[in-house]
Each structure stands twice: as C-alpha cells, then as structure tokens.
Amino acid sequence: MPMLQMVDLHGQYLKIKDEIDSGIRSVIDSCAFINGPQVKDFATHLSEYMGGCHVITCANGTDALQIALMALGLKPGDEVIVPAFTYVASAEVIGLLQLTPVMVDVDYDTFNISIEAMKNALTTKTKAIIPVHLFGQSCNMEPILEFASEHGLYVIEDNAQAIGAEYTFSDGHRAKTGTMGTIGCTSFFPSKNLGCYGDGGALFTNDDTLAERIRMIANHGQKVKYHHSVIGCNSRLDTIQAAVLDVKLKHLDEYCAARYTAAQYYTHAIRQIDLREQLFITPVEAPYSTHVYHQYTMKIRDGRRDELKSFLAERGVPSMIYYPLPLQDQEAFKDITYYKGSLSVSKQCACSVLSLPMHTELTSDIQDSVINALKSFLNTLQ
Ligand SMILES: *Cc1c(COP(=O)(O)O)cnc(C)c1O
C-alpha cells in the first residue's frame, strides 16, 4: 500500500530540489538573511501573479491580519464581522487589538460567510468584515463588497487557504482572491497552497497610501530608519523563505490544478461508492469561484464522523477535523465576543466535517486506498 499522509511536502520538494537548493544556497552565500534582494524579487513576482496589486511581505499570516487591522486605524470597541467557522487567527487578531469580534454563521454548502448573516450583524459600531476563503474557495465577494461600500466598511480578505483561486463577478470579470477587498492577507505556512519552509505571510492592496502605511507598520512604524511615526511591529519575511517561495510561485497554478484533479477523483469515486447510504456530503463548488482545494472537506451525516475517523485511522488512513470547535465555543472568545443571530450552521459543520489527505503529490493509487477504506466503512453499516 502506498504511504498515506495528509500532506506530502517531501515528495513535492524532490521534484524542485535543484532549484530550491540553489535558491537557498545563494542566500547563504550572500548572508543577506534579512531583506535580501530575493524578498523584493518574490514580492514583485507575486504582485504580477495577483494582477498588479501592492504586495507587502511579512512574517506569517496571523501578522498579516493584525497589520491589516492596525493599518485601518480601528479603535477599541469597533466591531469586526468574522465567520464563526474558521481558523482561530481570523478572529484572534480582532481580540488582540481590543476590537470586538462579531461572529456570524456560514453557508452550509460552501463553509464560507453567510451573506444574510453578515447583513444582519450590522450595527452603528461595525467597521470591517473579514471574509475567509475557507478550504480554497472564494466567498461570494460581490454582495460582500456591495454591502461594505453601502455602509462604509472595510473588507479584509483572509486568503490564507485560497491563494490562486479566482472569483467571477456577475458582469463576467474575474479577480484573484485577496485582491478584491480593502486589504487581502495570506500565509505561507508550509502546508498552505503556496507554502515556504518555515513561516511567512503577505498583505495585498490596490491602495497606494494604505500600502505605504502597511509597509511602515510591519517595519516598527518607521519610513526613515530610526524615525518612528506610529507604533508598529517587527514582521518580516526572511530571505531564505523568499527564495523558496520564488521557486514555488512558478508552480502554483500547476499545484492548484493537481489539487483540483485529485478532488474531482475523490468526489466522483465517493459518490459511486455512496449511492445507497448517502452518508458523505462531498464538497460543493460555488458557481462564482474556482476551487483550489487547500482542503478536501466532506460532511459526514448521522453523527458518524468520529466513528469514521477512528475507523480510517485503524486502517492507516489519516484524516483531520478542520475545525472541531466553532469560535463561539472557544473559551478565549467568551468574554469579548458579540453574537448576532444563530451560529447553528457553524456548529453543525464543526460536528460533521472531515478532511481527507490532499496535496500535490496524490496519485490514483493513494486515493484508491482512501476510497477503499471509506467503502469498508460503508459496508459495516449494512
Ligand atoms: C493558516 C491560516 C492563518 C494564519 O497563518 P499563519 O501563517 O499560520 O499565521 C490565518 N487564517 C487562516 C484561514 C489560515 O488557514
């Protein structure tokens, strides 16, 4: 049986080893570990890839979100709308800056922020919305952007899981996720679709003034060295990571395509084996977005998710629960959050989701062993 793992960074590395090794070696040879020329080169290339927006690199995706909120000058007590079903970082930074996270429900099919719930959460204190493009698919940005512009709200896209995805507006024009809001944020954590060999992140914006401000905040609030005009932080992408990312960026579209192909293979096979039981709900692709499948996330009916997860584990098939607790059930948020409306879909998702192995090196052999294990589980139900 082929080796099963959630992600296969080593297999991916072996295919680009020469380029990566020489990229890393050139950084070490120059010893320009901080702000070496590779950082600027990568930012330029990423900007071209994203369609020409400003790209400001930073230390990780969480910092990117924090810097975005700082750059918009939000004040304690300002409300920021965020989906309850997401990775903690999307909301953690809101609390860290003493802003108020207003958690809203997600859409059952796409796992992304519910437009209706977002609209219902508006108060006089609302200042920003953080749509999270979860699992590799864009939120429905057009109604979000319209609502934001009607009410003077900032939009910060959490694009950590969807870099490379594209949204199609109703007039047919397309835009990369992360470039549609006031600011877009992403993470280069190793397992992300564009991942480095350590930590990294970036911010995107089309606003020149904001880009300048973001750059300044990420660099101790200084524009001129040792002259600090605002309180900032120290958040840099290091040169070795930039060298790795510059190599991997060239492969990003091919990586997204490999993930997409693998996802289609899963969906087709899973529907075939599950015709009778209808236990597995395969991912739903929204008509307005491409899907870059950061995760292949199913929902398991009838409360059988945990049982299935153990069954797979016993057969050497890894799976993960992203995410087992919606934010409203996290202790850290219990005193700082303001809720408006039901969060029952987020809860339902947390109780039923299961993500299967998904990476760029999947083969039909590997996927067949996952599918066979799912089939064995279905057989135990008869
Ligand atoms: C990974 C991730 C982040 C944070 O990225 P780090 O680089 O780990 O700080 C933020 N939001 C989402 C949705 C993520 O998946």
Image (cartoon, helix red, strand yellow):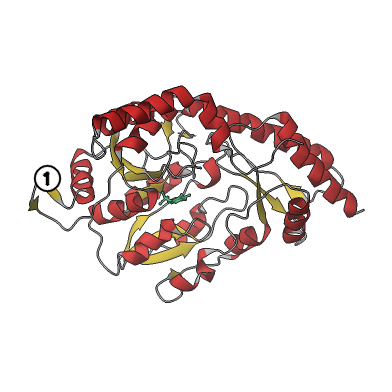
Picture quarter with the N terminus: top right
Q: Is residue 44 above or below residue 55?
A: above
Where, by quadrant of the figure, is residue 181 drawn?
A: top left
The reply to whether residue 124 is visible in this rendering is no
Point 30% across, 51% down: residue: 68
Point 61% across, 31% down: residue: 361
Point 58% across, 43% down: residue: 295
Front-most of 294 and 84? 294
Q: Is residue 203 above or below residue 30?
A: below
> Dot 1 corresponds to which residue?
223
The reply to whether residue 58 is visible in this rendering is yes
Report crowding for label 1: few under 14, some 14 to 19, many 20 or more residues within 10 A (C-alpha).
some
Q: Is residue 221 above or below residue 97?
A: above
Q: Position of residue 75 (x, y in %)?
A: 24, 65
Where, by quadrant of the figure, is residue 262 drawn?
A: top right
Viewed as shown, does residue 239 lie left or right of 120? left
| SS category of the residue bearing label 1 | strand
Q: Position of residue 270 (x, y in %)?
A: 77, 40
Q: Position of residue 269 (x, y in %)?
A: 77, 35
Front-most of 127 and 355? 355
Looking at the rendered structure, the kind of residue marked 1 is: Lys
Of all residues, the one furthest to the front in this rendering is 29
